[in-house]
Image (cartoon, rainbow, N blue to C red):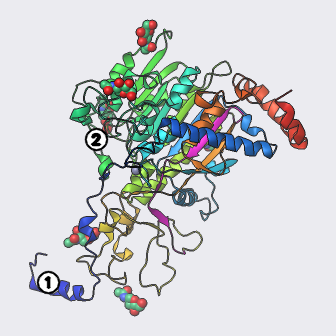
Amino acid sequence: MQCLLILFCGVAVAWAAVTVQPPPLIQTLSAGGDIGPEFKLDEQGRIVEDAQYWHKVGLQQLEKTIQKAKRAKENSYERKAKNIIIFIGDGMGLSTISAGRIYKGQYLKTGFGEETMLSFDEFPNTGLAKTYNVDKQVPDSAGTATAIFTGVKSDYGAIGMDTTRSETNATQGQLESIMDWAQREGKRTGVVTTTRITHATPAATYARIYHRDWECDTEVPQQSVGIHADIARQLVERAPGNKFNVVLGGGLSPMGALNQSEVRTVKFEGDTETICTRGDQRNLAEEWLKLQQNGTEGSQRVLVKTREDLLKVDVKKVDHLMGLFRNNHITYSIAREEGEPSLQEMTEAAIGVLERGTSSAGYVLLVEGGRIDQGHHQNYARAALHEVYELDLAVQAALNMTNSDETLILVTADHSHAVTFNGYPLRGTDILGPANIHKPKDPMVYETITYANGPGYFDHLANDTRPQNSSNVWLPLKLFSEAELQSPTYRHMATLPLKDETHGGEDVIVFASGPGSSLVRGVFEQNYLAYVMSYAGCMGPAKAIDGSCQNPLIGSVGTSTSSGISLTTTILPIMAAIPALISTRRSL
Ligand SMILES: *[C@@H]1O[C@H](CO)[C@@H](O)[C@H](O)[C@H]1NC(C)=O
Ligand SMILES: *[C@@H]1O[C@H](CO)[C@@H](O)[C@H](O)[C@H]1NC(C)=O
Ligand SMILES: *[C@@H]1O[C@H](CO)[C@@H](O)[C@H](O)[C@H]1NC(C)=O
Ligand SMILES: *[C@@H]1O[C@H](CO)[C@@H](O)[C@H](O)[C@H]1NC(C)=O
Ligand SMILES: *[C@@H]1O[C@H](CO)[C@@H](O)[C@H](O)[C@H]1NC(C)=O
Ligand SMILES: *[C@@H]1O[C@H](CO)[C@@H](O)[C@H](O)[C@H]1NC(C)=O
Ligand SMILES: [Zn+2]
């Protein structure tokens, strides 16, 4: 410490004598970000959890679930979904969901908060997904998105490739995604995200690449150049990406369409605020606009870059819509910039482009609320919870625009976070406020939302500022002004110093509504979700495991909406009353 005035040094020394000094961890842990050594399940390579292994695990879970339903004389699992919408709240663990629904109630001032329901809280079915990667107990979005969208669990960082992936061989370990399966059945497909369109979660629906970081050509390491095409290129050059009907999100920079004059009002920090730029001078957004798919003469392609232009799109006429609204991720919704659409607006446009009525084969859509995760990584609890609220609106919009007899909607997270919802705050207490302000004798006032680790440590650590009744280690909360506490960049406290808060490893919840939703029950490996979509959507590997796609029960593919409704309302009560009829119905 530099001492400019003897007097100040004297104060500091006197304080230090009575202060518990922070542990030396502050130096060793703050580096963060490193994946660590490569992990093999065993040294001899006898245990291989590759595509074939996880395929078996997925099918076994499906069969187990179906057997349980049959024993209970239930048959709703056989119902087929014409459309599938999967919502991923990136990093939206259970503590985030509980806190998010309280935030929603308090933000909308509908009550105390705790009694509030999120739109997906009302879904009829839930289950728990085990999220670990093949090589990591606590996973990342690349490995988990690969599990959800391809049905194959993989390694931390892997996109659309199983554990046999190679940096020097791009064909080895390639996987198909739900989007490949859907396109083969003539379904329309789309991806919506608040992150860069090349970021891990959306990328796993269309790219097959050794590592998630290779979003631009400049990020592909020397030994893989000419072998692995970067993620942005894969979106435009290959199926299923180049056949998507909808691509909405951020990422102008990796797509080679950087906006030099982009305005940034609030400065957010962290690893996710940096972006790659292309070195090959290609403008992949313009290239996408010029793609002409075979056999779809006259199909209209539109590229938009602002909210205003998005809202002007005639969704009934446009067959291929790309919207790129930001160089990097779309700004946190709590600090939305001019010209940026909300997740709800993007979701509405996407469904508009995908929905083509009773004679169509339906669609598969991914909607990602991608910045819940990134808010948590910086301990920006307010920004993260506001993203949950925005995801809730997008789900509500999807419910409003679709028929629950023909559309399977899943809402889940890829993984959790090291965030806690703790203390004994009184009913109705501000979810982002202190937990124990009502107990004046407590030596330290602390927040209801705190983190096990992250950069919030540095913001709350008592240093030269004399700590007052804050356990002598942390700055008293009252030293933060109201404006600081309300700021979207205010960090909640973290108890371990990391530049970037980490993910959490506990199970995530899956909410399900619509045909096939009753397959979501109990605890399962995360890759099972791809098999739920495959079986319910009559596409991909579980399409033909039984006769249910040839002889669909109700609300089936190709059945008109209105007859779907009347069948449901007339048959269901009868089936409930005569269980024996259900089990024999298929053989009739
Ligand atoms: C790459 O991997 C594939 C699949 O394992 C294999 O067939 C092919 O021979 C490999 N190519 C090279 C150049 O090693
Ligand atoms: C770049 O972004 C600014 C706002 O951030 C916007 O006004 C302008 O229209 C954008 N330019 C292009 C070419 O999209
Ligand atoms: C269009 O058809 C030609 C010839 O049938 C084929 O080589 C090409 O790959 C097709 N292009 C697309 C985008 O499907
Ligand atoms: C959904 O529909 C309800 C009832 O019409 C309406 O009140 C609500 O605003 C809609 N919500 C969204 C997000 O579209
Ligand atoms: C002490 O903590 C405050 C609040 O986080 C910070 O702004 C300041 O830079 C810190 N001072 C030192 C000397 O580390
Ligand atoms: C700290 O707490 C003690 C008792 O809990 C109280 O007497 C004292 O005034 C407090 N000091 C400050 C600066 O708040
Ligand atoms: Zn993350």
State the residue at coordinates (49%, 77%).
Answer: 436
State the residue at coordinates (90%, 43%).
Answer: 577
Amino acid beneath label 2: Ile
Locate the C terminus by quadrant: top right
Residue 187 image offset from top left, x and y in percent: 58, 23
The image quadrant where one finds ligand 6 is bottom left
- Residue 409 is a magenta residue: yes
Residue 238 visible in the current orientation: yes
Amino acid beneath label 1: Cys
Residue 154 image offset from top left, x and y in percent: 44, 42
For disc 1, the neighbor class at 10 Å (few under 14, some 14 to 19, many from 20) is some
Disc 1 residue lies near ligand 5 with CB under 8 A = no
Locate the N terminus by quadrant: bottom left
Decide which of 276, 401 is in the foreground and name it: 276
Residue 497 image offset from top left, x and y in percent: 31, 66
For disc 1, the marked residue is: 9
State the residue at coordinates (29%, 38%).
Answer: 262
Question: Mark 2 or mark 1, which has the lower sequence index?
Answer: 1
For disc 2, the marked residue is: 275
Give the alpha-carbon distance from disc 2 to disc 1, as whole Å.
43 Å
Decide which of 173, 21 is in the foreground and name it: 173
Label 2: which secondary element: loop
- Rendered position, 283 above or below 459: above
Decide which of 317, 198 is in the foreground and name it: 198
Label 1: which secondary element: helix
- Magenta extent: 404-424
- Using residue 372 as the reference point, say whether residue 457 is left or right of it: left
- Rendered position, 372 above or below 317: below
> Can you tell which of label 2 and label 1 is closer to the viewer?
2
